[in-house]
Each structure stands twice: as C-alpha cells, then as structure tokens.
Image (cartoon, rainbow, N blue to C red):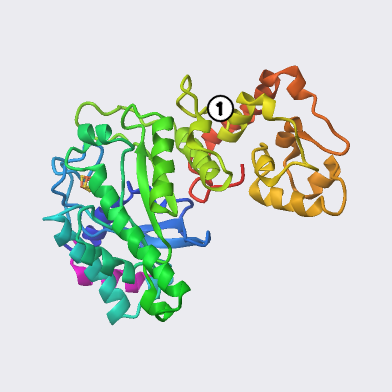
C-alpha cells in the first residue's frame, strides 16, 4: 500500500479521538496537502496545527463504540516507524504543522504497540532533533519503562479513560479496565511529579528532568451509554484530583456504520458536549464541586442554560452578590463574570466604589450579570420577579449554541 493511501486511512481513523480537538479549519493549504492536519490548542492555549494520525488502525480489542475495533469492516493500514518520522518532518518543513499527535490501535500487546510509538518520538527527537510539539497516546498496560521513555520525548501524554464507569466498559469495551487505565495514569503522574521536584530542587539540569512538560490528559466519550452528566463530572473530578490531569476532552459519541447492538443510533446533542466543557471549566477554575452542577432529580446538565447560570437559578439565596464587597470565590460564581473579570473587579474596587458603568468598562457582561449583582447604583429587579424571568431572559440566546457545535469548547472560556 502506498504512503498516500496509508495516510488517508490512518488520518481518517484518528479523527474520532477528541484529545486534540479540531477547533477550526486547517490553515489555508491545498486540501490534498492538508490530509491529517487538525487544528488544536497547545498547553499554553495557543492554536497549533498538528499532524493527527494513528500508527496503525489494526486493533486486537473490540470496543463497540470504536470504528477501529477488531470486528469492524474497515480498510486497515499500518505505518512503519520511519514513515511517520519522514511524514512529520516533511509536513513541518513545509510549514503545515507545529507538531504531531500520534495514537494507535493495539496490535500485538500493549508493549509491542507502545514500543513502536516510542520509537517514532525517539527517532524524531534524538536522530532528527525535531523540536515541534508532540502529543503521544499511551497504551494502558504498557510497561513502566516504556511510559518512562515516552515522557522523555513527548510534550504531552494521554491515556483514554473512554467511559466514566467500569460498568460501561464491561458492556462496551470488556477488555478494558479502569484500574489498569488508572495504573498507567498513576505511573505518568509519578514521573511528572518527580521531574517537577527535581527541577524545583535543581538537582539535575532542566533537560535531564524533562518529562511530559505539557502534562497528561484523557478523553471521555459521552452519550454511548446511559451514564449521566453527573457520572461523567464525578469521574472527571476524581481524575483531576487523583491524577492532576491538565484537562479532559469530552467527545460526543458518533454512531458508526455496522456498530453492534446496544449502541445509540443517534449522536447525543453537540450542546451536551459543550455543556460538559463548560462544567469542566467550572470544576477547574471556578471552585465548583461536581455535585453542585447537577441534582439527583436532574442528573444531566441543562441544554438550554449554561451550567453556571443553571446553578445560580437553582440557588437564588446566594444572590445578589455585591461587587464592591464580595470575596473572589463568590464573584466567580456570578453568571457573566469570568475569572479575568473577577481580577479586574478586585483591582478596580480598591480605587472606588463600582457602578454599572464601571463594570461595563471592565468588560463585564451586564446582560448576564445584572440580575445577580449589587453595584453602587444598582440592585437587581429580576430576581425579585422570580427565577423563571431570568431563565426566559437567557434561554433563547443559549439555544443558539446549537448553531456552533464545538466552538470554543476545546479551549474553554469564561462563563
Ligand atoms: S483499544 Fe482503542 S483502537 Fe482498539 S478498539 Fe478500543 S478504542 Fe478502538
């Protein structure tokens, strides 16, 4: 099989992995030249173009939700290590990419696959002094030695958790175990922490201590089982706490032709994916706990309202918040005021009492925040009228999110 055909198959097979989300069209290039290029965000939040491919789409596993599963009737291909190295260098030389995202189906065993993945990045770094960004997928169950080496060459490592509960894996990916996945994450975290410690104490030169400096991430598929957003967010919260993940990517299940019974025939709303990204942002940067974002009666996030607004409407007793007196954590919970807005408010109110016009100058979204805040010249009326008025005020515009699936989700945003 020629290289072009392999690239076509293995770039297509990689597009189901959301861990380097496509957030925008590729740079303006001849489409024939741009096969396999995905736009994503680097660890510093900057947009980067990646060659996003699988090393192989042969897989000994049979995860029902995956187009590359053993029983799937799709064309198969496998790159040789030098082919991926040459492709990456060629794309980079032509200015098409900033880096490589490399994953693979599991051919042979976990170590056999991981050894080949590591061989690619080792060759790029050591033999070709490739300095571009590398995100390497790791194979659960691969040996500690291989994980160790993977992190020496790659900027970011990830292990896909795929589904939030073992019961979901038992049903759709019975060869996978959360315990094994977490064991791989533990090993990576251990090495990241050790490298950071060595650097802090300056025991070794920076380059020697380097281990996956852009951290580790994972991906969860949503909508393939009946797991609720509460299940997903609880799992996400534990992973952030236990593994120090840089981030979790949520990928709405994509129905695949010829999939086994028991999988939904339609994809979940892309708004659900967007809401999970927003909720995730609240967990990481706004001090929310997973259990605050849903309720036992409503275990899924609202599709009509963003999770911060939905929480505010469920908790009218927490409002209004006085922008001139409230502590940072309380301001962070106000709809329409993001983390940057909170910093601006805290700084500006040292100089004077803030009125609505001041907040506008600080680029606070008054349309969203006004019903929830007290300012020098303002007390809200809408909350006194009842939460439904506020809901009606926001819901129609929130529904427009449906028109922009995926927009902004991968980088998150101020809520
Ligand atoms: S192990 Fe990965 S590539 Fe293989 S079937 Fe499962 S999800 Fe697909």
Residue at image point 84% right, 45% down: 354
Residue at image point 26% right, 43% down: 178
Q: Secondary structure at mark 1?
A: loop
Left or right: 399 as drawn, with respect to 147: right
Is any atom of residue 155 visible in this view? Answer: no
What residue span does the magenta drawing correspond to? 78-91
Closer to the camera in the image, 288 or 61: 288
How far across and how far down the image is residue 55, in percent? 23, 60
Which residue matches tag 1? 304
Residue at image point 23% right, 26% down: 262
Is any atom of residue 57 visible in this view? Answer: yes
Q: Is residue 28 above or below residue 272?
A: below
Is the stretch drawn in magenta largely helix, strand or loop? helix
Residue at image point 86% right, 54% down: 351
Mark 1 residue crowding within 10 angstroms, few (<14) / some (14–19) / many (20+): many
Left or right: 207 as drawn, with respect to 380: left
Closer to the camera in the image, 91 or 100: 100
For the C terminus, which image quadrant?
top right
Q: Is residue 214 magenta?
A: no
How far across and how far down the image is residue 155, in percent? 39, 66
Q: Is residue 84 magenta?
A: yes
Question: Which quarter of the figure has residue 264?
Answer: top left
Question: Which quarter of the figure has residue 32?
Answer: bottom left
Q: Residue furthest left?
A: 108
How far across and how far down the image is residue 39, in percent? 45, 57
């Amino acid at each position: 099989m020629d290289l072009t055909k392999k690239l076509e198959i293995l770039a297509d097979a990689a597009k189901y992995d959301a861990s380097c989300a496509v957030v925008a069209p590729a740079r303006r290039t001849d489409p024939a030249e741009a096969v396999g290029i995905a736009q994503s965000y680097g660890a510093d939040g900057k947009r980067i173009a990646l060659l996003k491919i699988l090393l192989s789409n042969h897989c000994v596993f049979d995860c029902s939700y995956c187009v590359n599963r053993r029983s799937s009737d799709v064309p198969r291909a496998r790159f040789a290590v030098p082919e991926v190295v040459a492709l990456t260098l060629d794309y980079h030389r032509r200015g098409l990419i900033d880096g490589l995202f490399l994953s693979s189906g599991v051919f042979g065993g976990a170590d056999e696959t991981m050894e080949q993945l590591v061989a690619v990045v080792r060759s790029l770094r050591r033999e070709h002094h490739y300095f571009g960004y590398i995100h390497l997928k790791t194979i659960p169950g691969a040996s500690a030695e291989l994980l160790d080496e993977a992190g020496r060459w790659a900027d970011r490592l990830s292990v896909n958790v795929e589904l939030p509960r073992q019961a979901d894996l038992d049903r759709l990916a019975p060869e996978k175990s959360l315990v094994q996945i977490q064991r791989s994450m533990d090993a990576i975290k251990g090495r990241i922490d050790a490298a950071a410690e060595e650097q802090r104490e300056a025991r070794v030169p920076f380059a020697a201590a380097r281990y996956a400096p852009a951290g580790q991430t994972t991906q969860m598929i949503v909508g393939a089982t009946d797991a609720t957003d509460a299940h997903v967010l609880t799992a996400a919260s534990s992973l952030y706490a236990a593994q120090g993940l840089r981030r979790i990517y949520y990928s709405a299940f994509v129905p695949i032709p010829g999939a086994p019974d028991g999988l939904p025939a339609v994809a979940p709303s892309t708004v659900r994916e967007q809401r999970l990204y927003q909720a995730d942002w609240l967990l990481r940067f706004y001090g929310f706990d997973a259990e605050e974002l849903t309720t036992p009666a409503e275990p899924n996030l609202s599709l009509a309202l963003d999770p911060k607004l939905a929480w505010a409407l469920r908790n009218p007793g927490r409002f209004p918040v006085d922008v001139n007196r409230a502590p940072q954590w309380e301001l962070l919970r106000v709809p329409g005021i993001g983390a940057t807005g909170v910093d601006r408010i805290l700084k500006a109110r040292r100089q004077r009492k803030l009125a609505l016009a001041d907040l506008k100058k600080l680029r606070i979204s008054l349309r969203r925040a006004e019903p929830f805040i007290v300012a020098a010249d303002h007390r809200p009326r809408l909350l006194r009228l009842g939460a439904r008025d506020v809901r009606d005020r926001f819901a129609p515009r929130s529904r427009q999110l449906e028109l922009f699936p995926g927009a902004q989700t991968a980088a998150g945003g101020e809520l």
